[in-house]
Structure formats: structure tokens, C-alpha cells
Image (cartoon, helix red, strand yellow):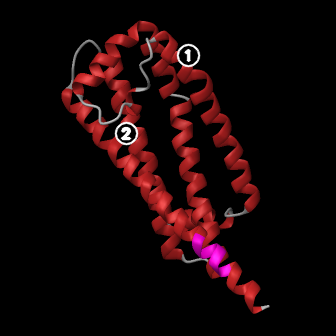
């Protein structure tokens, strides 16, 4: 864990954040601006499985049925490409951003803080990947229904969204501390 922490602390810089931000914007733009509209046109307006709010087995299998062969193929291709990259890049971006902001506020690294942030990022990414694995499995095994796989996927989806709320709250806190710290310095000068 120490080597990973050193790695992230080393790359917690504006240039890296900018570069990762551009990559995330490109991936998200392709996913949301090209693939999703195409999938929804092919599937009578049915969105990605994990974006269906509070989904259950009935909703998922209805969506999978409505996808048809072409929709399921598009979904699978996206799940094993863009939907693997986006959570990974987002987790790396959030880890580096939080470490960067912490460093701005405190003028130093905090190994424990960095390790917790890294673990949160990895757990969020892994929950997204597990969710994807569940949805891929549901699509691959269709028309056979596997309730437990859908339930595990739903738990991962809910957990991922809770983690994202936590990330957002942490970012708001660190941004507030960063602004407050810079205002305090400017008033002292």
C-alpha cells in the first residue's frame, strides 16, 4: 500500500488532473453522447441496465428482453470497453484530486489520508466493475433468469452511488477548506 500511496502522491499535480479530466470527458462523451443514444434508438428508449433507478429482477429482465440481440450486443461491447475505463479513470482522477486538494490545504501529504482515499477510490471502482460483471452475466445467460446475480448487481449499483455521494461531499469539504485557507492567507498579507 505504501508504494501505491507514494505513486498517487507523486502524481497529485494540476497537469495530471487536467490530462485525466480530458480523458474522462472524452470517454464519457463517447459513452453518453454516442453509444447511449444509439443503444436507446435500437432498444425503444431503454437505457443502460445499471442506470435504471432502483432496479429489480423484473425491470432488468424486461429491459434485457426489449434490448433484443442487437441491443444486448451493443451493451456487451460497451461494458467490456468504455465501462471498464470510465470507472478506473474516474477513481484515479478522484484519488489524485483529493490528495492534491489536501496538500493545498495542509501544505503536506498525510499518508493515512492518502491511503483511505486510495482505498475509497479502489472500492468504488471495484463495485462498478462488479456491477458490470453482473450485468454482463445477465446478458450472456439470457433468457435464463438469475435473480441472485441481479440482486448482487443492484447492491453494487446502490453502493457505487452512495460512494459517489461520499466523494462529492469530501470534494465539497476539501474545496471549502482550500478556498478558506487561501482567503485566510490573503487577509494576513
The image quadrant that residue 62 belongs to is top left
Residue 108 visible? The answer is: no
Please tell me whether residue 32 is drawn above or below residue 95 in the rendered image. Answer: above
Residue 180 shown in magenta: yes
- Label 1: element kind: helix
The residue shown at (55%, 29%) is 81
Q: Which residue has dot 2 on it?
A: 130
Most extreme residue toward the right is 189
The structure residue drawn at horizontal position 72% and vertical position 63%, both measured from the top left corner, is 13
Residue 123 in the image: above or below residue 44: below
Q: Quadrant of the C terminus?
A: bottom right
- What residue is disc 1 on? 38
For the magenta stretch, what is the residue range? Answer: 176-181
Give the percent coordinates (x, y) of residue 110: 55, 77
* x and y, in percent, of residue 136 in the image: 38, 25
186 or 129, nearer to the observer = 186
* Residue 177, position as x, y percentages in the image: 59, 75
Label 1 crowd (10 A; few <14 / some 14-19 / many >=20): some
Q: Nearer the viewer, residue 41 or 157?
A: 41
Q: Nearer the viewer, mark 2 or mark 1?
A: 1
Crowding near the residue tagged with mark 2, few <14, some 14–19, many ≥20 C-alpha atoms within 10 Å: some
**Residue at (37% x, 37% y) in the render:** 131
Location of residue 127 by image quarter = top left
**C-alpha separation, residue under disc 2 versus residue under disc 1:** 25 Å
Of 26 and 174, nearer the camera is: 174
Give the secondary structure at mark 2.
helix
Amino acid at each position: 500500500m505504501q508504494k501505491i500511496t507514494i505513486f498517487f502522491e507523486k502524481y497529485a499535480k494540476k497537469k495530471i488532473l487536467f490530462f485525466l479530466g480530458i480523458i474522462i470527458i472524452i470517454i464519457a462523451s463517447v459513452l453518453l453522447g454516442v453509444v447511449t443514444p444509439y443503444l436507446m434508438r435500437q432498444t425503444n428508449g431503454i437505457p443502460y441496465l445499471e442506470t435504471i433507478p432502483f432496479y429489480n429482477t423484473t425491470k432488468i429482465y424486461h429491459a434485457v428482453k426489449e434490448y433484443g440481440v442487437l441491443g444486448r450486443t451493443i451493451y456487451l461491447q460497451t461494458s467490456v470497453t468504455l465501462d471498464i475505463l470510465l470507472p478506473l479513470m474516474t477513481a484515479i482522477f478522484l484519488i489524485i484530486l483529493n490528495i492534491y486538494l489536501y496538500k493545498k490545504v495542509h501544505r503536506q501529504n498525510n499518508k493515512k489520508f492518502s491511503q483511505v482515499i486510495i482505498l475509497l477510490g479502489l472500492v468504488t471502482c471495484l463495485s462498478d466493475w462488479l456491477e458490470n460483471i453482473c450485468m454482463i452475466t445477465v446478458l450472456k445467460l439470457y433468457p435464463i433468469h438469475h435473480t441472485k446475480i441481479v440482486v448482487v448487481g443492484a447492491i453494487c449499483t446502490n453502493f457505487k452511488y452512495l460512494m459517489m455521494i461520499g466523494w462529492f461531499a469530501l470534494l465539497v469539504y476539501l474545496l471549502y477548506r482550500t478556498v478558506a485557507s487561501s482567503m485566510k492567507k490573503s487577509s494576513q498579507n
